[in-house]
Amino acid sequence: MLERCVQRDATHLMICAAHPAASETVALAQYSHGILLTDTFIATSEPLAVLRRSDANSMRTIALHPATRPYTPLSEFEDVIEVASTVAAFEGLLQGKWDSALTQRRYADAERVTIVRPV
């Protein structure tokens, strides 16, 4: 999408600061193409945690949004499943698709879910 701004086919580009490619995109825009950037906060971030289904006997699988992967150690998990959002990680946790999820800490209030580790 940055190319569209360079070619003047687009006038704005919104980048999620938590996206793994955000810093590379910002550097390209600013220093390679001379595009003026404006920093805007659209929503506040929420505290995250690794949550586990209370009925899970182990923590073999965890779902997370790719941007949150470096936030906490994951070596204890056999499988790390990338999903579209932290909300999707929580929804799949409740549906029994995986044992754990890196998601909003406030979801720990739900039945059948416990906090393993605050992030």
Image (cartoon, rainbow, N blue to C red):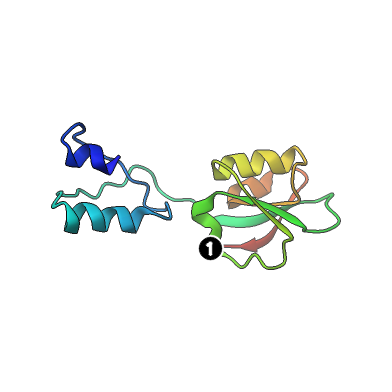
Q: Mark 1: which secondary structure?
A: helix
Residue sitting at 18 percent across and 59 percent down?
Answer: 31
Residue that numbered label 1 is attached to: 71
Identify whether 34 is placed above or below 9.
below
Question: In the rendering, at what x and y percent does residue 47 appear?
Answer: 52, 55
Indicate the amino acid at tag 1: Tyr
Classify residue 114 by image quadrant. Answer: bottom right
Identify whether 13 is placed above or below 33.
above
Classify residue 94 by image quadrant. Answer: top right
Residue sitting at 55 percent across and 41 percent down?
Answer: 84
Question: In the rendering, at what x and y percent does residue 102 appear?
Answer: 61, 53
Rendered-image quadrant of the C terminus: bottom right
| 99 or 3: nearer the viewer | 3
Question: In the rendering, at what x and y percent does residue 26 appear?
Answer: 27, 54
Question: Would you say 92 lies left or right of 57 here?
Answer: left
| 58 or 105: nearer the viewer | 58
Residue sitting at 59 percent across and 43 percent down?
Answer: 83
The count of marks equals 1
Point out the residue furthest to the top here: 9
Residue sitting at 80 percent across and 51 percent down?
Answer: 54
Using a 10 Å C-alpha cutoff, classify the residue at mark 1 as few (fewer than 14 neighbours), some (14 to 19) or many (20 or more): few
| 103 or 73: nearer the viewer | 73
Question: In the rendering, at what x and y percent does residue 113 appear?
Answer: 74, 49
Question: Would you say 37 lies left or right of 110 here?
Answer: left
